[in-house]
Structures are given as structure tokens and as C-alpha cells.
Amino acid sequence: MTTEFAGNYQGPLYAPHPDIKRNKMNSKQLQELKANYASLIVDGMDMRTLETFAMEMVEENMKDWDEDDVKQEILEYYGEETWNDMNDFSTESGQYSISDLEATAPDYGVGK
């Protein structure tokens, strides 16, 4: 016994017709898909994982920066005081913070 189908399509019933092609997404649709996928990933993270991920992304973004790039960024967003605090120990320039010097100074029994 043979089953005949209406029309000329001879392919399997579960496959789409070969003449029906899926349209590609436009750039706006692709951007929305990416945003939704990113949201799905972030929603699945706990706070510690999210912090680790954020740190890795920031570090990756800065991988090609030199010292001047880092300094400029810190000065622009956080100011000179933060730059000085973050850069208070530099053996190349011969500058040491007071706490670093105190930690390595001999104890003469005065002021400690």
C-alpha cells in the first residue's frame, strides 16, 4: 500500500520544504538576540561569579594599555588623590609610601 500526497513534495514530513528558506536576522534583531543571551548568562551568575567576570573583562580591556594610559584613565575618573594612593609604591621612581618604609625600618624603640 502506498500513500500519495497532494502536490509534488516528496521529502519527509518532518523536514521543512527545501524551497522555504529561513531569513537571516537584520542587525537590530541580532543585537536584540545578543542582549537577551547576555542577560540570560548574567541572570545565571551569583554575585561572586559576576564580580570575577567583571574584573576579567576590565583587565582584558586594559591589556594593551601602558602606564600613561592607566594614569590618564585613573586621573580622569577618580582624580589625582586616587592616582597617588594607587601609585604610592614605585621602586623604579624611588618613591615609597611611609607605611612601606615603616614596615621595613629597624625598631630602635622610639615611636613604635
Image (spheres, grey):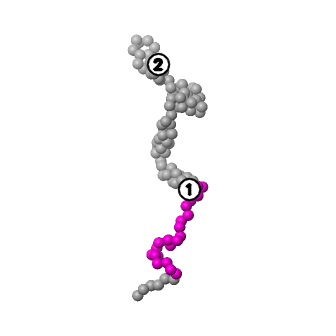
Residue 81: x, y in percent? 57, 26
Q: Disc 1 designates what residue?
A: 30
- Residue 77, compared with residue 89, is above or below; it is below
User: Which range is magenta?
Assistant: 7-30
Q: Which mark is residue 64?
A: none
What residue lies at 48% left-to-right and 20% top-to-bottom? 93
**Callouts 1 and 2 close, C-beta under 8 Å:** no
Q: SS at mark 2?
A: loop
Residue 65: x, y in percent? 51, 34
**Residue 95 sits inside the magenta stretch:** no
Residue 35: x, y in percent? 55, 52
> Mark 1 Cα within 10 Å, few/some/many (few <14, many 20+)?
few
**Residue 25 sits inside the magenta stretch:** yes
Quadrant where the C terminus lies?
A: top left
- Residue 91, compared with residue 18, is above or below; it is above
Front one among 106 and 24: 24
Q: SS at mark 1?
A: helix
Q: Disc 2 designates what residue?
A: 94
What residue lies at 47% left-to-right and 47% top-to-bottom? 46
**What distance separates the C-alpha of mark 1 from that of mark 2?**
53 Å
| Amino acid type assigned to the residue bearing label 2 in the image | Gly
Residue 55: x, y in percent? 48, 40
Q: Earlier in the sequence, mark 1 or mark 2?
A: 1
Q: Main secondary structure of the magenta part?
A: loop
Image quadrant assignment for residue 105? top left
What residue lies at 44% left-to-right and 12% top-to-bottom? 110
Is there any visible trace of residue 88 in the rendered image? yes
Front one among 39 and 35: 35
Image quadrant assignment for residue 100? top left
Is there any visible trace of residue 96 in the rendered image? no
| Amino acid type assigned to the residue bearing label 1 in the image | Leu
